[in-house]
Image: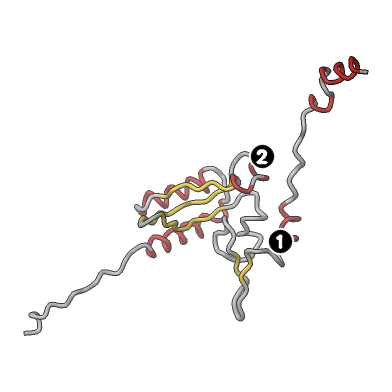
Amino acid sequence: FGSSRCQTLTRPCPLILRSVSMPAAAAADLIWECVKGNNSFIRKSPNMPVMSAEAGNLCGLNSYKFSGLANAKAFDVKCVKTGSKETIVMTTSNKKSSRAQKPGSRLIQAGVKKQTKKGLAQIAKATEGSFYRRDLIELAQKKYQKVKTSLKKKKVVVKSRRAGK
């Protein structure tokens, strides 16, 4: 009894040697049909379009075109505050398909230059240059401009008491 048990433990198990394949990700259309009516990111208000707060949603609308959940290629430009510093960040999906099933590493954030000419060129290179969501290039550049203007602080104008005299 004891000797046969030792033999079974030392033999390699055929199930372990087989390569385990990951199940294929669901189609984007199927994910959108499941998510479009009800998910944790939807924000509804009366007399307003249905908005969405998901990561990778460029316009914030609950739409298949802009969805960061349903699309395999998500894209977003936003402002991120770290401490007292505010930076402009471009969010894209990871190029490795295996990362699509890992929520923590699905999206990649890359910094964008604040100098207008270089920042717009960086966005154009990420979208148009690498054939990645070319349909969103104009919207992304407009949003970049708006985010950049939102970073400007109002200057406090101090009136001189002597100027009026």
- The secondary element bearing badge 2 is classed as helix
Left or right: 26 as drawn, with respect to 76: right
Q: Position of residue 50 (x, y in %)?
A: 63, 71
Is the residue marked by circle 1 packed among few (<14), some (14-19), or many (20+) residues within 10 Å? some
User: Measured from the top left, where is residue 152 in percent x and y?
Assistant: 33, 64
Q: Where, quadrant-wise, is the C terminus in this rendering? A: bottom left
Residue at numbered disc 1: 35
Which part of the image, by quadrant, shows the N terminus? top right
The residue to which callout 2 is attached is 98
Q: Residue at x 73, y 46 (%)?
A: 25
Residue at 75% over, 49% down: 26
Q: Quadrant of residue 45?
A: bottom right
In the rendered view, would you say 146 is above or below 10?
A: below
Q: Residues within 10 Å of mark 2 (few under 14, many from 20)?
A: few
| Residue farthest to the left, as pictured | 165
Tell me where residue 161 appears, x and y as whole percent: 11, 80
Tell me where residue 79 appears, x and y as whole percent.
44, 58
Query: As rendered, which of 16 and 35 lies closer to the eye?
Result: 16
Q: Amino acid at mark 2?
A: Ser
Residue at the extreme front: 2
Q: Residue at x 51, y 44 (%)?
A: 129
Amino acid type at image mark 1: Val
